[in-house]
Image (spheres, rainbow, N blue to C red):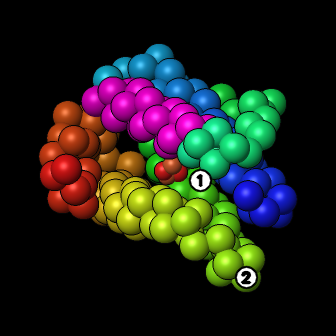
Amino acid sequence: MNATIEKLLNDQVKFEANASMQYLSMASWADANGYNGVAEFFYLQSEEERVHMIKLVKFINERSGKVIVPEIDKPQENYTSLNELFETFLKSEMFVTEQINHVIYECLQHKEYNVHNFMQWYVTEQLEEEAVARTLLDKLTIIGNDKSGHYLFDRDINTIASVNQNPE
Ligand code: OFO
């Protein structure tokens, strides 16, 4: 595998690992603050990001590359509101999308068409996750500071999110 592409894939392993820990931290904050539905949502997101990370690790190994298991950045622990929590979620997803687009661009520059093909799964996944994050943030913007609105949001988060989720 081209060395630049190998490095970019390892960077991506780190970004997925960071996202997994960030969402675990967000799940824990929600759990501690009485938002059980939001907590379950982020516990699941955290697991999904771990799956994305492992998928990359296995792919690098399959292509006889060298996997560097990354040091993880310390995630943000405290949030002032559900709004801030979901703004962080959207920002994190937008950052990952940007990185994936960069990997795709470099794959084409280096004629790494197999990697390019592999990365298409991540492109689709990011589209879906950004759409979910935007939908949830839009709902919270409508709700504003209304406490009963937050209660209903927490109760219905999976139904709201499923509008953008692929049934696969
Ligand atoms: Fe890994 O799917 Fe979003 O970040």
Work out whether residue 144 or residue 130 is closer to the camera in this orientation and state it. Answer: 130
Work out whether residue 91 or residue 166 is closer to the camera in this orientation and state it. Answer: 166
Alpha carbon of mark 2 to alpha carbon of mark 1: how far? Answer: 26 Å
Q: Residue at x 24, y 55 (%)?
A: 165
Q: Residues within 10 Å of mark 1 (few under 14, many from 20)?
A: some
The quarter of the rendered structure image containing the N terminus is bottom right
The residue under label 2 is which amino acid type?
Answer: Gln
Q: Residues within 10 Å of mark 2 (few under 14, many from 20)?
A: few
The reply to whether residue 22 is visible in this rendering is: no
The residue under label 1 is which amino acid type?
Answer: Ser
Q: Residue at x 61, y 30 (%)?
A: 21
Asked if residue 136 lies left or right of residue 79, the reply is left
Task: Please state the extent of the stretch shown in magenta in the rendering.
Answer: 37-58
Q: Which is closer to the viewer, label 2 or label 1?
A: 2
Which quadrant of the figure has residue 56? top right
Which residue is label 2 attached to? 109
Q: Residue furthest right?
A: 3
Q: Earlier in the sequence, mark 2 or mark 1?
A: 1
Reply above or below: 113 against 96: below
Q: Residue at x 73, y 45 (%)?
A: 65
For residue 41: magenta?
yes
Asked if residue 46 lies left or right of residue 137, the reply is right
